[in-house]
Structures are given as C-alpha cells and as structure tokens.
Image (cartoon, rainbow, N blue to C red):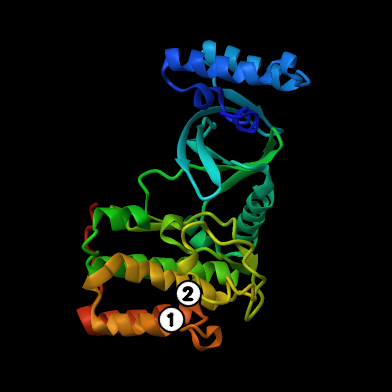
Amino acid sequence: MNRDAVLALLDRPATEIFGPDPAEAVRVYHRMARLLHPDTGMDGAAFTRLTAKWRAYGRGESTTITTKKHVYEVGPKLARGDLADLFEVTLDGGPAVLKLPRNAADNDLLEREAVALRQLRANGDPRFLPYVPELVESLRYEGRSGHILVRLEGFHTLAEVHDARPDGVDPRDAAWMWRRLLVALGFAHRAGVLHGAVLPEHVMIHPEQHGLVLVDWCYSVPATVDSGGRVPALVSGRASWYPPEVPGREPASPATDLFLATRCMTYLMGPKIPDPLRNFARGCTLSAQKKRPSNAWRLLTELDELLERLYGPRTFRPFKL
C-alpha cells in the first residue's frame, strides 16, 4: 500500500476502508497512519481525515453526507461499476443508492449522466420513465461528483442473465427483453439522448415482472435528428462490442445504440438464436453506420412482425433465473 493508494482510500466510507474484521482493521489503520503521519512530511490534513474515519469506524458509524435536500447515511457498497461504486443510503420514502466515481478524473462522466437523466425526465414521454433510473439529486463529496438514485429492487443485469443461462436464453424469453430495450431506446432518442454504452452490464431486467431499466448514462451524448456527439469513452473490457464509429471518434447516432442493443440480444441467445432472428440482427450490426436501422420504434414494429411469423401471437411467458 503506497501513499497515493492510501489517500484515495480516504474518499471511501469508513466501513469500506477498514473492513469487517476488527483485527485486520487495526492493521490497516496502523499501515495508513505510518504513511500519513506528519512526521513523514505530510501536511497533517490527510492524517486528520484518517483519524476521523477511524473514530467513525470505532463507533460503528456510517459516513454522513448532508445536502440542501437530505441527510444521507452511507451504508455498505452494493456494486462496483465501470468507473463508479454504488453504496446503500437511507432516504425517506424508500431505498436509494449513492453513485460515486472511484477517481475524481471521471467527475465529468457522472455529471454527464445527471444531465441525461434530467433531460429524459423533462423531455421524454412520462409513460416510459420507468425504463430509466430516477435521479433524486446530484452532490459533491470530497472532491467527487456523484448522485443519489432510487434503488432498483429485484433487477438483474443481462450479464447476470447470461451467466445464469450460459447455453443461451430461449429466444421467446429474449423477445420481451429485446422489445423493452427498443422501447427504452425509442423513448430516449425521441427525448434527445443517445445512451452510448448499451452493454449487458447496463441493461437490467426484472424477471418476474418483465421489467427493464437502462442504466449508466455516463457515456451518453445529446442526439440531433440523425446523429449526436462523440461517445466520450469506451467501457473497459468491452471495446470489441462497439460499432466502428465509436472507437473511430466519429459522431454517434441512434444506429449506434441499436447496434449495441442487438449485440446484447445475440449474446443472450447464443447458439439458440434461430436463423431469421440471426439475419435480422445482422442487418442491425452492419459496420456502415448509415446502412443500419436508426429508428427504434420502426425497428420494434419489424421485430414484432418477425416474432409473430416465428412464434405466433404474443403470450406471457414466466421467466425465472
């Protein structure tokens, strides 16, 4: 553990810094104290912060964040995302999460997400708001830009669905996920926002309720009629998923999101995808952006027609992981 790593840890809640084991917590504290003590040449501010965190840990206290709207008690970490961590927080009216970047250099991406979520709520059709996270408020915490989101209960990412069904999801089950994902994108594009990173980790479904929420709008860009800006970054480990315009630093478009959404669905179905759906997906994932579908609502109609030819009229199929 070096000094830079210790300084970065001071931005985390006390329970996360020192961990659940009291004996190990003491060892962690002493290692950090040796590196940050004023006798080592530090200015003393970091050591004061460390001492405050240690006292809070000893009292069993969670970190408290106070804003103009609420006082939040920050609980344990719930998940680790691409560039941010999600923490449990208490909020009157229901469960919520705090989303904070691990590195302040990514503040701009968190701020981009907040702008997108506000624009979707202001400009989008309210019937489709359940397809995107609900932003409670944005905040600053120890130099980092974060926000509070209403917590999603009972949802799983498509990555988790894939891991649970490694042999492939039945196309009749993937169908409702595909349809809802196209609705989410049609809603967003009409509201003037491109998601920019429609990946398995960012699409969450509720198996029993057949719900879907498209999360992590940190890579979003404003959309014009036909195109948008450049997607600001690629998600680590998923570079091969993107259409050529993203790594090529060219403007994205609705066709960019539809390319990625289609890849999510073929990834889910794997070897179980029937040839007609495979051909449909191939047309959505052409390398030339202008040759791909760019209207999610029109694509949904075409998908519905294909599904009816394959499986007949739609029926509700219970889905369990």
Residue at disc 2, secondary structure: helix
Considering the image in quadrants, where does the N terminus appear? top right
Residue at disc 1, secondary structure: helix
Residue at left offset 35%, top offset 83%: 280
Q: Where is mark 1, residue-wise?
A: 284
Residue at left offset 51%, top offset 88%: 291
Q: Is residue 137 visible?
A: yes
Do labels 1 and 2 touch, CB within 8 Å? yes
The part of the image, by quadrant, that contains residue 247 is bottom right
Residue at left offset 24%, top offset 64%: 169
**Crowd around label 2: few <14 · some 14–19 · many ≥20 (10 Å):** many
Residue type (three-letter) at the residue carrying disc 1? Cys
Residue at left offset 44%, top offset 80%: 285
Q: Position of residue 127 (x, y in %)?
A: 50, 62
Does residue 299 appear to the left or right of 71 in the view shown? left
Q: Is residue 146 above or below residue 214?
A: above
Q: Where is mark 2, residue-wise?
A: 258
The part of the image, by quadrant, that contains residue 34 is top right
Q: Position of residue 139 (x, y in %)?
A: 68, 39
Does residue 298 appear to the left or right of 208 in the view shown? right
The part of the image, by quadrant, that contains residue 195 is bottom right
The residue closer to the viewer here, 170 or 48, is 48
**Crowd around label 1: few <14 · some 14–19 · many ≥20 (10 Å):** many
Q: Is residue 45 above or below residue 93?
A: above
Q: Is residue 93 above or below residue 46?
A: below
Q: Is residue 185 above or below residue 134?
A: below
Residue type (three-letter) at the residue carrying disc 2? Leu
* Extreme residue toward the bottom, this view: 291
Q: Earlier in the sequence, mark 1 or mark 2?
A: 2
Does residue 29 appear to the left or right of 317 in the view shown? right
Q: Position of residue 164 (x, y in %)?
A: 25, 53
